[in-house]
Image (cartoon, grey):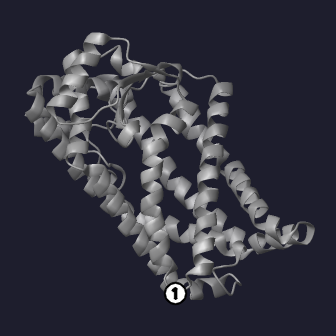
Amino acid sequence: MENLQEGNGAGVKSGPVFGRARVYSNIKYSLSIAGWIYTFILLFLFLKLGLSNNLYLRLSAYLWEVLAAPFYLAAVFLGYYFFTFPFIFFQSYYLECKFSLSNQSAKDWLKDSIKSAAVSCIIGFIIISVFYFILNHFPGIWWVVISAFWIFFSIILAKVMPVIIIPLFFKYKKLTDEALRERIMNLAYKMNVKLIDCFEIDFSKKTLKANAAFAGIGNTRRVILADTLKDKYSYDEIEVILAHEFAHYRLKHLLKLIICNSFFTLAGFYVIFRTSHFVLRMFGFSSLSEIAALPIVFLYFLLFGVITQPLEAFISRRFERSADRMAINVTGLKGAFVSMMNKLSQQNLADRKPHPIIKFFFFDHPPIDERIRDAA
């Protein structure tokens, strides 16, 4: 589900709520930076100390060759989860509890964390398997073919997300408020959006934050409302939220984001294609097709992600502003938009007015104060 506000809300700009929001946000920014550095060091040492190569050689000595690669991947995924678990726990559970944003027990959080890791592992295994297949069968143009596959795979993920992945973590049910459902369906008709139905999910069992989404493609396209939003916001506020989501569809923002991400992916793989021979020698490998050299690809995209993140965030902020404008123009609910933004900022503890450098690197939505100012 899309975050309605990157940085996750902030309090009204006065008193202790605003102070808590700033502290909460600063901790999250610090953890993001520390997590990047920590992951880079882990991957670098895993390669430089020969651990990756030794792991694969040991597996190859005890297993059939066809099994060595999948077992290597499984070991890498498990090792990564184990060594990054302290960051995951602190950021997504301890911090949320400390700032009274979580409703989960540690046991329930751990179940979700394991499920999330399993889903990531399955998706990662598919992508990596296809990567090596393409690398071995299209040696001269593999970076083009894998980028084309990424576009296709991104579309598939967007289609199955609301019907396969989200139900793994939340309970679905059709929206029971018929008056609200009718209002949403009328808004979809007004904005020429084809909508399968409206659903609500039990967000409140995990968090006090609010969220909403217009998710899926084709016959999986649906509105998803968190109960934390449905039960605390007026019909006008919910309508302008969903008008914003529908505006993304009308303005083809999902397609444009897929194209942008695919371009960045193409550029990233091209850089690997042109420079990997030098990096491979640095870590004692002769070819990128060696399975033990896979962490080199992870290192590339870790660095590339840091470089491209500000540009991706800038593009996303522009899309969000245009969706805000369309939502207000279509509904005429400027007052509801402002009140909704203020409620979200309090409920989600967002940084309403971040430092320009923080905004440049971390915010894929305009800060709350800017969105309210632009609506005036």
Q: Which of 297 and 249 is in front in this view?
A: 249
The structure residue drawn at horizontal position 60% and vertical position 49%, both measured from the top left corner, is 120
Q: Is residue 35 left or right of residue 229?
A: right
Viewport quadrant of the C terminus: top left
The percent coordinates of residue 91 (x first, y second) are 54, 40
> Are there few (<14), some (14-19), or many (20+) residues within 10 Å of tag 1?
few
Horizontal and vertical percent position of residue 70: 75, 61
Residue in view at x 16 percent, y 22 percent: 336
Q: Position of residue 54 (x, y in %)?
A: 82, 72
Which residue is at the front of the view, 25 or 192? 192
Asked if residue 206 lies left or right of residue 193, the reply is: right
Q: Which amino acid does label 1 sit on?
A: Gly
Determine the image quadrant of residue 40. Answer: bottom right
Q: Quadrant of residue 94?
A: top right
Q: Is residue 93 visible?
A: yes
Q: Is residue 155 above or below residue 260?
A: above
Q: How many labels does the image show?
A: 1
- The location of residue 30, given as percent across then percent down, is 47, 49
Quadrant placement of the N terminus: top left
Q: Which residue bears the numbered disc 1?
A: 140
Residue drawn at (25%, 29%), measured in percent from left and top? Answer: 241
